[in-house]
Image (cartoon, helix red, strand yellow):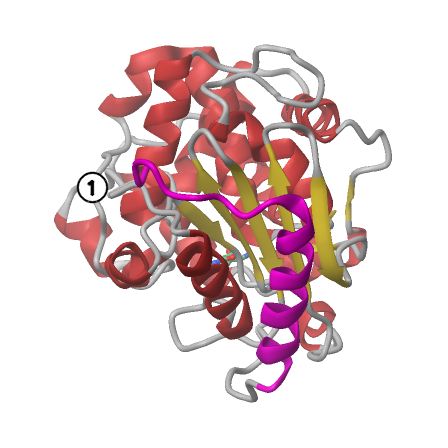
């Protein structure tokens, strides 16, 4: 991260977040995800911004305790569990390269014989779901208890309506899964794998919950709130690397250029950015740009990072 910069004191942080949050409300671009009714109905005006720092402080503005559909941010949780369970064998079945394609693209997957480009796009996360379904007798419970522990909140749960709706409108993701199965890269029953994938997309959390849960990535693998070691420092660095190169889909290069932080977004409008050795910036606002990233969320994180001088580069 940027060496020797002055990090604002918490008082200033509060007023900075207030200003950034207020300015973001004025942005009117973007469209709320509408591929399922449960997401299309979400109030587009909701907007949250949270910064969690490694000294245990959480500073927020707006709807920072409102639970929303974390969607693709769940790909980080699934990946953590799969990395822990199968170690480096995972990288035989999924690559670690940016895709330069939309998150649900199919073409590249056929060219590359059913090996997804990375675990941050849909094909990669479906592959990770296969690993979890194949290695855990109850893969959903395994993910849920991990997320609840990370968050320090036993009430984290999946939104049943979103889960069912994803299943009903899941043709594109089914196509990705069956294509990988045809190449022999999915081991378990495809319907079970897709059910796990859609379920984990439907987890609901707030920006404060997300910031708490992923703070270990900024703290060399140890949760700054509980003091528990979650992953090794090396694994935390690797997850951050994948988020840097692929977490914002085919806008990852743009995000690296303009913000310079590992981040993961979801079509629910959430974005979590990791600032190694400092903390986490989490933002939520439902309207998305054409890449599937939250318009206000990106702008709020860019402003906070710029004003605090935070970047890993
Ligand atoms: N980018 C996303 O958040 C994608 C998740 C969404 N449920 C899908 O599978 O299409």
54 or 113: nearer the viewer: 54
| Residue 255 in the image: above or below residue 151 | below
Viewer-proximal residue among 5 and 81: 5
Residue 2 is one of the magenta-drawn residues = yes
Q: Residue at x 66, y 21 (%)?
A: 142
Which of 243/298 is in front? 298
- Provide the residue designation for mark 1: 97
Q: What is the x, y in percent for residue 113?
A: 17, 41
Q: Can residue 203 be seen in this view?
A: no
Q: Is mark 1 on a helix, strand or loop?
A: loop
Give the residues drawn in magenta, as a range.
1-26
Residue 4 is a magenta residue: yes
Question: Where, by quadrant of the figure, is residue 210 drawn?
Answer: top right
Position of the N terminus by quadrant? top left
Residue 215 x, y percent position in the rendering = 57, 31
Image position, residue 202 (x, y; %): 67, 50
Q: Nearer the viewer, residue 21 or 249?
A: 21
The image shows residue 122, relative to residue 21, as above or below, that is above
Answer above or below: position of 93 versus 304.
Answer: above
What residue is shown at x 50% (from left), y 23% (from top)?
219
Q: Which residue is drawn at 63% across and 40% down?
A: 52
The chief SS type of the magenta part is: helix
Name the side, left or right, on which 258 lies relative to 9. left
State the image coordinates of residue 173 (x, y, percent, origin top left): 45, 55
């Amino acid at each position: 991260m940027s060496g020797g910069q002055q990090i604002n004191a918490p008082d200033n942080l509060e007023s900075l977040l207030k200003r950034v949050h207020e300015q973001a409300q004025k942005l009117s671009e973007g469209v709320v995800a509408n591929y399922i009714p449960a997401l299309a109905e979400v109030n587009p005006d909701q907007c949250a911004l949270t910064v969690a720092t490694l000294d245990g402080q959480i500073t927020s503005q707006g709807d920072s305790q409102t639970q929303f559909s974390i969607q693709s941010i769940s790909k980080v949780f699934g990946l953590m569990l799969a990395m822990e369970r199968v170690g480096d064998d995972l990288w035989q079945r999924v690559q670690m390269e940016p895709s330069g394609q939309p998150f649900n693209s199919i073409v590249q997957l056929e060219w590359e014989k059913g090996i997804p480009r990375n675990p941050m796009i849909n094909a990669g996360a479906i592959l990770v779901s296969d690993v979890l379904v194949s290695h855990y007798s109850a893969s959903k419970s395994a993910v849920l208890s991990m997320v609840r522990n990370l968050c320090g909140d036993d009430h984290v749960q999946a939104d049943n309506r979103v889960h069912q709706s994803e299943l009903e409108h899941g043709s594109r993701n089914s196509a990705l899964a069956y294509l990988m199965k045809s190449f022999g890269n999915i081991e378990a029953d495809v319907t079970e794998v897709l059910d796990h994938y859609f379920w984990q997309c439907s987890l609901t959390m707030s920006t404060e919950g997300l910031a708490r849960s992923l703070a270990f990535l900024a703290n060399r693998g140890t949760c700054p709130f509980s003091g528990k070691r979650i992953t090794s420092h090396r694994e935390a660095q690797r997850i951050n690397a994948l988020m840097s190169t692929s977490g914002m889909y085919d806008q990852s290069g743009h995000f690296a250029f303009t913000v310079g932080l590992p981040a993961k977004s979801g079509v629910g409008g959430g974005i979590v950015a990791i600032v190694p050795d400092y903390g986490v910036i989490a933002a939520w606002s439902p309207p998305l740009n054409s890449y599937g990233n939250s318009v206000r969320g990106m702008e709020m994180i860019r402003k906070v990072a710029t004003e605090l001088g935070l970047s890993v580069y």
